[in-house]
Amino acid sequence: MSSEVTELTAADAAGRVRGGELSAAELFAAWRERAAGDSLNAYLWLADEAPGEIAAEGPLGGVPLAVKDLFCTEGIPSAAGSRILEGYRPPYTATVVERLTQAGAPTLGKTNMDEFAMGSSNENSGFGPVKNPWDESRVPGGSSGGSAAAVAAGLAPWAIGTDTGGSIRQPAALCGIVGLKPTYGACSRYGMIAFASSLDQAGPLTRDVTDCALLFGQMIGRDPRDSTSLAFPEELTLPTAERLDGLRFGVPPELSGEGIEPGVREVFDQTLARIEELGGQVVDVALPHSNEGISAYYLIAPAEASANLARFDGVRYGARAGDGDLLSMYEETREQGFGDEVKRRILIGTYALSSGYYDALYGRALRVRTKIAQDFRAAFERVDLIVTPTSPTVAFGLGERTDDPLAMYLSDFCTVPMPLAGIPAISIPGGMSEGLPVGVQLAGPAFSEGRILDAAFALETAIGFDGSAARDA
Amino acid sequence: MIDSEQVRYVARLARLRLSDEEVDRMTGELGSILDHIEKISALDLEGVEPTSHVVELENVLRPDEPHESLPRDVALAEAPDANETGFRVPSPGA
């Protein structure tokens, strides 16, 4: 029974619960049992039992949800993958989690992540790395690596994560699942432990595009508690497209040529051929400043992080260290509580904002950001969607890149330009290379999620990716 | 281009205590990262407006009306050290 219901997609399971064929409590118990067998370190916390009330009549049909540890959940440990917040139980719940619970997706567990969402491999977690279910000697990607691995391995029906420079799309790609980074402002950031506030967005990680659309539809909307959130301008329906006729797909050479490994390029080329088979048109489109995306991103995100992370000082929550005066309490708490990558980014950000470097570094990065956004605007006058590989490589080995932070940063070049421009992008599995999944990314103008999901659905159907091997393992 | 004295200075600004070994390692790592990042210095950005925020929003205001906030005991519950009325910290001059 339990193995049967956990094989269903989330949308199918929701349909059965809403149709009265399956009880939400049984479904929760079945998933709870699957999740308890986690051998990937994907979960940091797991619910003991089903919540007393599940809104099973809601659109999400009682299907349980894995929630990235970055989201505050009332009374439930929420540490953002950091030792400095170990054991912290927030007094309130993030708006997105609250909305999903009310729509019928009770929280199953909290998933592992790179500390404060800083990382592309999950190796920066304060609670140990996550393993990739396709090959346990490899990383799942990051920072939402626990959420991606849990969905790919069949330890969760679906999950939410957050994306600042690729933290939903890249782990989705490396784990062979679907991940959507929404338009900036589409989902409330209230209750998300802040990394880089002008870039952070919550989004779904799911087994397929239909699940992604279903979950995303319940996450969106303006929230008075996040003044940067906006009402989604159009009604979202579940995708049904079979063809891509009339759609123009732009391929930027800057994000699909140099630096992309051959196996990934091969899957990407096959995907372009499929787009044409489905009636879509593939054209070259230039994003001339996207090569500067990494530089702008690794100034802006650390600058914002250095300010956001000033709040972790041992006063109001989390760990406290030191037995001297106030200053040494601050310094020792932060010394012991933060991992290396977080310290590195705080230092870069503080440096970029410090007097003498502000104009030359941070100020210039903000101008590059303008150029990147202008490039996308110009491109979308010519094409409907932009298509690129999501990650230049398949999942790499645990420990392979930890000694070279710059190499780790550079591997994000396909995903950082979109959040800098605030636009949405999805990663879907395009195929396999060397026995590992390869992700393909579709990006569109602000609030074009409906178009993106439709096109992704048509492509997904044509590709016919089979992720069951990772769930059976 | 960043030397160990600058790393120590920035760490002090950020209230991070680094061991000598960490200062050495971070100086090397930050040096190579900043060398790469500083390539943006070569771009012609004359007359380009900075973008600090992608959404065109101005003056998002709410009515100035009292509303409920976190009760004090709840806000204090997770503090490493608190009494009934506030967060307790070591003296700045101890």
Image (tube, coloured by chain):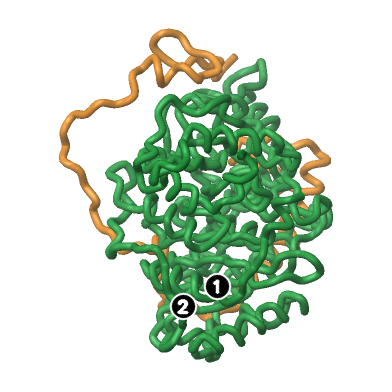
Chain colours: A green, B orange
- Cβ–Cβ under 8 Å for marks 1 and 2: yes
Find residue A452 and report its horizontal and vertical position in percent.
Answer: 45, 71
Q: Residue at x 50, y 75 (%)?
A: A458
Residue A174 versus residue A184: which sits nearer the camera? A174
Which three-letter amino acid code belongs to the residue tagged 2?
A: Glu
- Location of residue A60 with respect to A242 vertically, above or below: above
Residue A461 numbered mark, or none: 1
Residue A351 numbered mark, or none: none
Residue A198 versus residue A295: which sits nearer the camera? A198
Find residue A436 and report its horizontal and vertical position in percent.
Answer: 76, 64
Query: Which type of secondary structure does the marked residue at label 1 adopt?
Result: helix
Residue A210 versus residue A30: which sits nearer the camera? A30
Which three-letter amino acid code belongs to the residue tagged 1?
A: Thr
- Location of residue A207 with respect to A83 vertically, above or below: below
- Location of residue A319 with respect to A157 vertically, above or below: above
Find residue A357 and report its horizontal and vertical position in percent.
Answer: 56, 59
* Quarter of image, res A439: bottom right
For label 2, the residue is A242
Is residue A346 in view? no
In the rendered image, the residue lying farthest to the top is B84
Q: Residue at x 77, y 44 (%)?
A: B23
Query: Which type of secondary structure does the marked residue at label 2 adopt?
Result: loop
Q: Residue at x 35, y 41 (%)?
A: A57
Find residue A189 and report its horizontal and vertical position in percent.
Answer: 41, 47
Of pointers 1 and 2, the one earlier in the residue sequence: 2
Instruction: Specify whether A239 is left or right of A9.
Output: left
Is residue A30 in view? yes
Q: Residue at x 75, y 48 (%)?
A: A131
